[in-house]
Image (cartoon, rainbow, N blue to C red):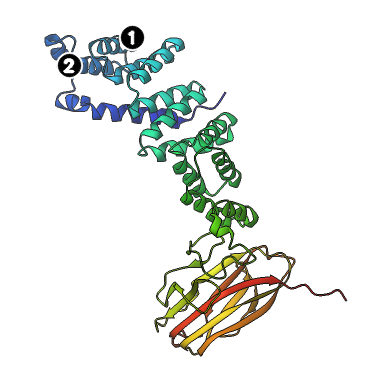
Amino acid sequence: MLKVYPFVFFLLCTVLVWRVISLGVSEFLSADSSVDNIDAILSWNSVNPQALLAKGLSHLSTDKDSFEFYLAKSIVSNISDSRSLVLLAERWAERGDIERANKAMHLLVKLYPADISVGLAAASYFYSRSKLTEAFQHWSQAMLRSSRFDSVIFDFIYPQLKHKEMRDAVINASRAGKKWWPRFFAYAIKQNDNIDIVDVLYAARLESAKPVKPWVRKQYLNFLFKHDKWQKAYMVWLSGLDEKERKSLGYLYDGGFENEFSYYGFYWHAYKNKAAKIEQTRVRASSGKKALKITFLNKPVPFYHVLQITLLRPGSYLFKGKVKKDGLTSNRGINWRISCKGQSLLAQSIRFNGMEHWQSFEVEFKVPEQKCNAQEIRLVSNGKNKSDYKIKGALWFDDLSIAQVHRPNR
């Protein structure tokens, strides 16, 4: 049997208090909460539902039978008020009349299908009776109708994924493509403590008839990057490419800069910055229709904002392309650097400076056997002080590529 956490009762109490406040009982009690006043009201109107509920609550800790009696009268006088039935069901369950309490909760849900507080109360009730699947159904319905209780529900559900029944319920919701699932998936990613759960949630979502939204795929990719799950990340990224993007695949993706920047995964990353303006510009003197153009703004700010991540196996490679220097004035120049992701530098191109029409450049590098599962190709400015980073002019790049170098055996 699952452990009944104190949180369940806290949630139930929170829901009930919220209901009492929202429907005006607190206003009634704040006027005069004395039992004498309640009795006076009942003497004038013996079926006043609020007074009957208040009278029942006054017996909550002293006389459970009277508590139950007045709650029942309150329900008869106003069946549209869910509070008395919630409290009465809990009272019946407390004294062991589980079947009667279950029926009351089922009736509640039927009477108030759109009432989130009733759904939460039902979920807490059924969870406390170890009916986890039924409890989850009510949580799911509440999350479908509103996101305002997400933080409370997610905080409770997530730790329970260690239980097979809860995990199966969440996985089934993932497969069904429930509207709240992306919010829960984002929550699971932020916990950053269980890679397996995030993987299982995403895999289950792929089984849904509804396609995965791009922003959800991006979240998952960033999560995989953070945990150095490069091969899995590549397959996830690959699954999201359209036909045009797939034609640009290779050791280096889209070396002709024909596709739009996407800023995540294994696309080109081209971030906004204060040092330069980055754009894809139409050109005639290239094999495609576009080229990368970087116009430097003469600011004392380092430039390192164009990059791509690659997954190259150990071996020798040649990085090459075409460059056009358009009045580039820089103390120390700009070049491409190739490194193991977050670690050692493998190679760097010549430094670009000056004025020159389209010319070819290339640099050979070697990917080591160890500690280099992913690589980074990044364009950077060189400098030792602020004045070195003040750059004028523009740089153009096109037809970038990486090819493996095969050397004959000796």
Q: Quadrant of residue 228?
A: bottom right
Q: Where's residue 325, x and y in %?
A: 50, 85
- The residue at 65%/71% (across/down) is 402
In depth, the one of 357 and 227 nearer the eye is 357
Whole-Å distance between the Cαs marked 1 and 2? 18 Å
Q: Quadrant of the C terminus?
A: bottom right
SS at mark 2 in the image = helix
Disc 1 crowd, CA 10 A, few/some/many (<14, 14-19, 20+): few
Q: Where's residue 389, x and y in %?
A: 46, 84
State the residue lying farthest toward the right.
Answer: 410
Left/right placement of residue 361 relative to residue 103 reads right
Q: Where's residue 223, x and y in %?
A: 54, 53
Question: Can residue 18 be seen from the camera position used here?
Answer: yes
Q: Where's residue 396, x and y in %?
A: 50, 79
In depth, the one of 25 and 22 nearer the eye is 22
Question: Can residue 382 be seen from the camera position used here?
Answer: no
Disc nearer the start of the sequence (1/2): 2
SS at mark 1 in the image = helix
Disc 2 crowd, CA 10 A, few/some/many (<14, 14-19, 20+): many
Amino acid type of disc 1?
Asp
Residue ID for mark 2: 38
Amino acid type of disc 2?
Ile
Q: Which label belongs to residue 370?
A: none
Q: Is residue 318 above or below residue 329?
A: above
Q: Is residue 372 above or below residue 83?
A: below
Q: Is residue 12 above or below residue 107?
A: below
State the residue lying farthest toward the left.
Answer: 44
In depth, the one of 182 and 268 nearer the eye is 268
Q: Quadrant of residue 144?
A: top left
Q: Is residue 196 above or below residue 71?
A: below
Q: Which label belongs to residue 65?
A: 1
